[in-house]
Amino acid sequence: KQKMIIDCDTGVDDAQAIMMALSRPDVDVIAITCVNGNVDVEKVCRNTLRVLKIPVFRGCGKPIIHSTEDAQFYHGKDGLGDLRNEIEVDLSCIQEEHAVTALLRLSKKYPGEIQLVALAPLTNVGVALRMDPEFSNRLQSLVIMGGNMHGKGNRSSSIASEFNFGCDPEAAYMTVHEMLCPIVIVSWELCLDHVYPWEKVQECMNADTEKARFLRDITRATLTTQRARQETGYRSCDAQAMAIALEPSITLETLSIHASVELKGDLTRGMLVSDWRKKLNKSPNVTFVTKIDTEKSLTIWMNMVHV
Ligand code: BDR
Ligand code: CA
């Protein structure tokens, strides 16, 4: 089985992504590490436990330097679509051990075997790198939902940055420059171009299972928001990144390039900047996914409520 750690800021789409990973018999989710992002890290831990009852590791509660904003306007005050039916969570599942030390420990226990899927600001990953640079050498790969290819942003401040990179630009910078394992980037633009058909999402939410009812509860608000914006289908960035992590054959085209993260600009802080013209004369450090098989991604999405 493929060992996977999910670093997340659960979040509606993080929750959907976690459900997708758990529905796969070929994947062993060995830890969920939480970080400040869509909502504060306490709510993130709590939301993660609303999705599943397994040990979760509480990680960094603040970005490396400073932030910023959360995404309650989109994910709800509770970060999970403002669930109407409260779910009892067992807070004792939150481990004493910090998420960063858990990442370091597990990477030592399973060298070369772990796929790390980062669906949130990269604070935990950046701090892990600082504590032990060899950490990244022990991972099999890192799949990141975050960053952008062409400067399209989705934050209110720093208009050219994607949320996860914009929330902790320094951590994103450290990650793209210091990671020694391959980095796959699922960018904001890729997610804009690859959405799930409305009727299929509805079909999935209407299935007669407990998981489908949960999906319906957490998805309702974001679905309404996106429909009101007249988008072409339902966008779930973290689900798309998870599908790519789970099924290599989903990726149809990639582009490897040298990229860095803007740390200064008022309008661009947190933007992932690609050296398209090879002006910096540096080797590629990231691989963008540029085209995916949407049918295969949809199949994984649909399965999350059944298995
Ligand atoms: C990312 O931002 C967060 O709000 C989502 O959970 C996703 O990880 C999209 O930019
Ligand atoms: Ca997220």
Image (cartoon, helix red, strand yellow):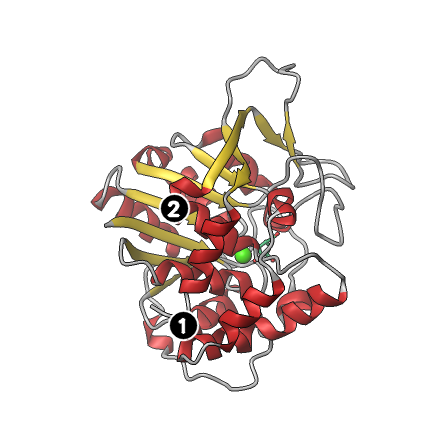
Left-right relation of 288 to 66: left
Between the C-alphas of marks 2 and 1, the distance is 25 Å
Task: Determine which of the numbered discs, if any, sits on residue 245 in the image.
Answer: none
Label 1 sits on residue:
49
Question: The residue under label 1 is which amino acid type?
Answer: Leu
Position of the C terminus, as image quadrant, is bottom left
Rendering quadrant holding ligand 2: bottom right
- Specify the quadrant of the image occupied by residue 268: top right
Q: Quick one: 106 or 187, which is closer to the camera?
A: 187
Residue drawn at 68 percent across, 71 percent down: 224
Which type of secondary structure does the marked residue at label 1 adopt?
Answer: helix
Label 2 sits on residue:
247
Relative to 75, residue 252 above or below: above
Residue 23: x and y in percent read 35, 63
Residue 189: x and y in percent read 65, 43
Q: Residues within 10 Å of mark 1 (few under 14, many from 20)?
A: many
Residue 86: x and y in percent read 50, 85
Residue drawn at 65 percent across, 52 percent down: 67
Residue drawn at 37 percent across, 38 percent down: 141
Relative to 153, residue 256 above or below: above
Residue drawn at 35 percent across, 52 percent down: 5
Please, which residue is most extreme toward the bottom here?
85
Left-right relation of 104 to 221: left
Residue 103: x and y in percent read 34, 49
Is disc 2's CB within 8 Å of ligand 1?
no
Q: Residues within 10 Å of mark 2 (few under 14, many from 20)?
A: few
